[in-house]
Structures are given as C-alpha cells and as structure tokens.
Amino acid sequence: MCGRFYLLDLFGLIMRFKLKLSPKIKPRYNIAPTQDIVAVINDGGYRVVHFRWGLIPFWSKKIVSGMINARAETVEKKPSFKHSLQSKRCLIPANGFYEWKKEGNRKKPHRIFLKDETAFSFAGLWDSWISPKGESINSCTIITTSANALIEPIHNRMPVILSEDAEKVWLNKNADIATLKGMLNPYPPELMKSHEISTTVNNPRNDSPEVLNPL
C-alpha cells in the first residue's frame, strides 16, 4: 500500500507540463491520508489542483474513509474506481514515500525514493462528491501494484510510479483501458533507493526535514 509520502518540489512537472502555480506550494515531509494534497489533472489543459487524499465516489451517500489506495489488479472492476479510471485520472507528485517493515512486534519505517532524488508521479484517480447539503469535495486515491525487488523485503505492495513518457498518456483523455492497465506495473528497482528512518515519521504532525534522515 501507500499510506504516507513526501513532496519537496514540482520543478520537473512544471517544466514538462508548463504548469502555473499560485500560490506557491510548500515542501511537505509527512503527508498523510485525509489531508489535502497536490495533483495534476487534464480538463482541457494541464493544471494543478488540491484533492483530499482518500477517494469518495460520486455516488456515495456519505463521506467514506479508507480508500487511499486502489489495487491495479482490480481497479477497472471496482465500483469505487472504474468510473474514475475511465474519465478522472490524475498525477500525484512526490519525491518519495514511506513504508514500514514488520520485524517481530515492531514496524520499522523506511524512506523510498529515486536514486537521483528527483520528483516523480504516482498514478492517481479522483472524483467529485456532493454532500446532501450541497458541499463539493474533490478527492483522490493512489493506485498500488505488487512490490519490486527493492521494496518486497519491506512490504508486498508499492505505489504505481509513472515514467515521464507515461505521465502524458495517463492524462490523455482518449487513452483506452487496456493501455492504461498496461502502465500499472512495479517501477524498476535499479532506479530506486531506500533506507531506514526514525519512528518520528509515525506521527504525521512531525512534518519537517528531519523525518527524511537515515538512521
């Protein structure tokens, strides 16, 4: 799964998609579910938006919790996600994410990132929900897949990381489901790194650069 990540900059996405950012987006070191997060969508043009992390399907009768991830293997079949896969796809930028390795009764957190430490994009889905009172909430989820060789000793799942070429395909409104499904694979392990970090990351209120430091 992917239950925590961090975002330091959007430089790569800004250049690739010619994005305009206002107001300036601040670095985040410990992003947690239900918080507002940054995403990129294509609604006639690429733009930056803010979503609540944890998808609320448009047909839901109430705010639901827990849908922070969608499994790549079944995403086109699940009622909560299949509509969004067809028409509401997004990029969720990050510089890395966290996963916990279980050892006995303990869970040791690890920071996982690209070797060159540049920003990348998770494959995401979003939806817009209207409450009975007329309130609109835009929310999103991160798609996960089986772990690659680097992450498998830590956890059996990982978020889908898209290559730069795949990002534009993912946001292409005319992309077919078979093409999209073919992109939901583990990222090459030789392009990634990880190290153990302090358990201070366990508390999302600890949102500071020190969270990233290796033990």
Image (cartoon, grey):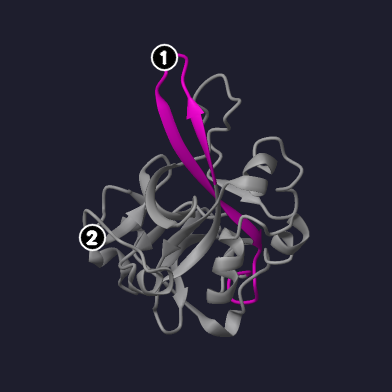
**Whole-percent x, y for residue 206 in the image:** 26, 53
Quadrant where the C terminus is found in the figure = bottom left
Q: CA distance from mark 2 to mark 1?
A: 37 Å
The answer to whether residue 43 is seen in the rendering is yes
Left or right, residue 25 beside residue 62: left
Going by the numbered disc 2, the residue's amino acid type is Ser
Quadrant where the N terminus is found in the figure = bottom right
Disc tally is: 2
The answer to whether residue 108 is seen in the rendering is no
- Does residue 73 sit above or below 189 in this rendering? above
Helix, strand or loop at label 1? It is loop
- Does residue 167 sit above or below 46 in this rendering? below
**Whole-percent x, y for residue 122 in the image:** 52, 61
**Image depth: mark 2 or mark 1 in front:** 1
- The residue at 50%/29% (across/down) is 129
- Does residue 17 sit above or below 59 in this rendering? below
Left or right, residue 114 beside residue 210: right
- The residue at 35%/58% (across/down) is 199
- Residue 143 falls inside the magenta stretch: yes
**Whole-percent x, y for residue 168 in the image:** 55, 67
- The residue at 42%/28% (across/down) is 136
- The residue at 65%/76% (across/down) is 149
Q: Which residue is mark 2?
A: 208
Going by the numbered disc 1, the residue's amino acid type is Lys
Query: From this viewpoint, which residue is outermost toward the front?
Result: 44
The circle on residue 133 is: 1
- Magenta stretch, residue numbers: 126-152
First of labels 2, 1 by sequence position: 1
**Whole-percent x, y for residue 3 in the image:** 48, 51
- Residue 65 falls inside the magenta stretch: no
- Does residue 12 sit above or below 174 in this rendering? below
